[in-house]
Amino acid sequence: MTTVIDGKIAAASVIEAVKAAAAGLEAEAGVKTGLAVVIVGDDPASHTYVGAKGRMAKECGFNSIQHTLPAETTQGELASLVQSLNDDLSIHGILVQLPLPKHLDSDAIIQSIKPEKDVDGLHVVNAGKLATGDLATGLISCTPAGAMLLVRSIHGEDLSGLNAVVIGRSNLFGKPMAQLLLNANATVTIAHSRTRDLASVARGADILVAAVGRPEMVKAAWIKPGATVIDVGINRIDAPERGEGKSRLVGDVAFAEVSEVARAITPVPGGVGPMTIAMLMANTVIAAHRAAGRKPPKF
Ligand code: GUN
């Protein structure tokens, strides 16, 4: 029987642990965990994501602040907002929603966030700590951290002897995911659009992580029987069978056929997706504990 890994249940259990940790920090140290989310412009999808992050932060008992800036905001204005949030002792996590409007230099903004408040895990200091195996003092990018938690729910902490293949090499996901798997002792291959015979590389994987951004690209023939398949893709495709103009979400993996071969697989939606916000909350409560000189919870 194939296990369909339920990301909603895993995310809910992370959120329960975050709530308990935030309540404990407030009761014992008088510190309310603070998250500031910054959004520039009026991209509707970004506003939906940011709204969900703010609501979840409140549900976790955080002080949740949203800064909504107009699309014409200058680099200097945004930089000075980040600076003031860096200096604000009541704020433990800062997230600048991406993408920023084209006239702004996102990398300069992200790198100006204090690494200890970079709950997105995008600062080079946090990327470097992950790359050097320092998981104890850095902050890990939320989607790979969430995907890794799902891998651990199947295989446990130690992936010794297992081959892991990550398809995708982005700084946001593929590279940190590969580092996390390597840290857990997996033998890791990073494959990408220039890889020769991707199918045969994928077939070597005991753990296959797909982040290619192409709907249902990973087929059953790419899967080693009994493998664990983690699908990071979120693609909206036309669904005329649901009525004219309707669409639906699919992952990068052809779920129906791959679930016949895999031992465990994440669905889309309801797999990795719900984990991202949960790990953002986890990073924020970790940052608040560290700022207060307290031992942070582990997730
Ligand atoms: N836009 C889409 N996903 C993300 C994310 O994980 N972090 C930020 N900052 N922006 C995003």
Image (tube, rainbow, N blue to C red):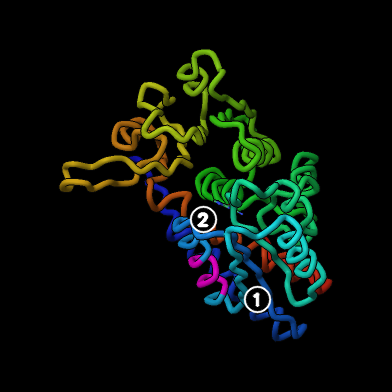
Q: Which mark is residue 247?
A: none
Query: Residue visible at 61% across and 26% down?
Result: 189
Q: Give the range drawn in magenta.
A: 51-57
Query: Residue visible at 61% across and 31% down?
Result: 169
Task: Judge whether residue 243 is colored magenta.
Answer: no
Q: Using the rendered image of the protein, determine whether residue 279 is visible from the camera's viewpoint.
A: no
Mark count: 2
Q: Nearer the viewer, residue 25 or 246?
A: 246
Q: In this view, does 140 lie to the left or right of 198?
A: right
Q: Are circles 1 and 2 on residues that touch, CB within 8 Å?
A: no
Q: Nearer the viewer, residue 2 or 122?
A: 122
Q: Is residue 34 left or right of residue 4?
A: right
Task: Judge whether residue 54 is colored magenta.
Answer: yes
Q: Residues within 10 Å of mark 2 (few under 14, many from 20)?
A: many
Query: Residue visible at 27% across and 46% down?
Result: 247
Q: How crowded is mark 1: few (under 14 residues within 10 Å), some or many (20 or more)?
A: many
Q: Is mark 2 within 8 Å of ligand 1?
A: no
Say what secondary structure mark 1 lies in. Answer: helix
Residue type highlighted by circle 2: Met
Q: Mark 1 points at which residue?
A: 22
For residue 257, what is the image quadrant? top left
Q: Using the rendered image of the protein, determine whether residue 296 is visible from the camera's viewpoint.
A: yes
